[in-house]
């Protein structure tokens, strides 16, 4: 395994860990919004922040490697796809920042019970699903998983986004 593939594998592992983090975080948030149960795992958010920071740093290196590869120079299509991954990642970072500011300013319980909180949750879940769908081929390749699982991966990601959107609406309605 060459140096580049080790970095890509590390990014794949970190990306998978981020997906698990978001699923756990969103599930705890949904349960909290619907039941009023307050999780004692607030520290868990910092694990997610650390994973995201690692993902961004590693992605800088993998992007640089891809763009400077002299053996297999990237095509215009690959460069556009890389730009799309960075653009959706930037949108995701912006949506997450707004989510954090609103939750910290209003308080999680107050924010989750409003239409604004529901909309923010829906936007965040949607942007996350888009970023994961755009990067699905890369993350599967990085982890050494067959590309034929790309469509099922995308379906599951979108299904979870819908589930979290529905729970956000239910928290406001119920």
Image: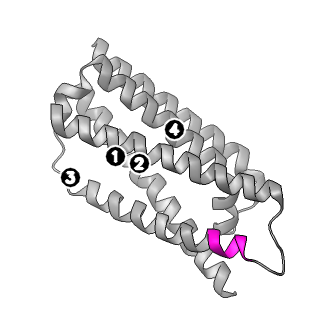
Taking the image as shown, residue 160 lies to the left or right of residue 120, namely right
Query: Label 2 neighbourhood size at 10 Å, few (<14), some (14-19), many (20+)?
Result: some
- Quick one: which residue is furthest to the top in this view? 173
- Residue 11 in the image: state x and y as whole percent: 55, 69
Q: Residue at x 81, y 80 (%)?
A: 70
Q: Quadrant of residue 37?
A: top left
Q: CB atoms at circles 2 and 3 under 8 Å apart?
A: no
Q: In whole angstroms, how far apart are the C-alphas of marks 2 and 4?
A: 12 Å
Q: In whole angstroms, how far apart are the C-alphas of marks 2 and 3?
A: 14 Å
- Nearest the viewer among 16 and 82 is 82
Q: Residue at x 24, y 21 (%)?
A: 113
Q: Quadrant of residue 112?
A: top left
Question: Mark 2 highlights which residue?
Answer: 22
Q: CB atoms at circles 3 and 4 under 8 Å apart?
A: no
Taking the image as shown, residue 153 lies to the left or right of residue 93, namely right
- Nearest the viewer among 59 and 44 is 59
Asked whether the viewer can see residue 82, the reply is: yes
Question: Mark 4 highlights which residue?
Answer: 127
Callout 2: SS? helix
Q: CB atoms at circles 2 and 4 under 8 Å apart?
A: no
Which mark is first along the chain, 3 or 2?
A: 2
Task: Please say if 41 is above or below 61.
Answer: above
Callout 1: SS? helix
Observer-side mark, 3 or 4, equals 4
Which mark is first along the chain, 3 or 1?
A: 1
The tag on residue 41 is 3
Which mark is first along the chain, 4 or 1?
A: 1
Which mark is first along the chain, 4 or 2?
A: 2
Q: In whole angstroms, how far apart are the C-alphas of marks 3 and 4?
A: 24 Å
Q: In whole angstroms, how far apart are the C-alphas of marks 1 and 2?
A: 5 Å
Q: CB atoms at circles 1 and 2 under 8 Å apart?
A: yes
């Amino acid at each position: 395994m060459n140096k580049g593939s080790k970095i890509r594998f590390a990014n794949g592992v970190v990306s998978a860990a981020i997906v698990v983090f978001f699923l756990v975080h969103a599930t705890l948030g949904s349960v909290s919004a619907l039941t009023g149960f307050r999780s004692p795992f607030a520290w868990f958010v910092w694990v997610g922040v650390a994973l995201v920071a690692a993902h961004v740093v590693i992605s800088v290196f993998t992007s640089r490697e891809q763009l400077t590869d002299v053996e297999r120079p990237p095509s215009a299509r690959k460069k556009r796809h890389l730009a799309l991954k960075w653009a959706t990642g930037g949108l995701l970072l912006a949506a997450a920042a707004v989510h954090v500011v609103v939750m910290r300013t209003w308080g999680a319980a107050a924010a989750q019970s409003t239409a604004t909180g529901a909309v923010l949750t829906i936007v965040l879940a949607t942007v996350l699903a888009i970023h994961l769908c755009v990067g699905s081929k890369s993350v599967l390749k990085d982890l050494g998983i067959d590309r034929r699982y790309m469509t099922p991966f995308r379906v599951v990601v979108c299904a979870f986004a819908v589930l979290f959107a529905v729970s956000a609406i239910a928290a406001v309605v119920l």
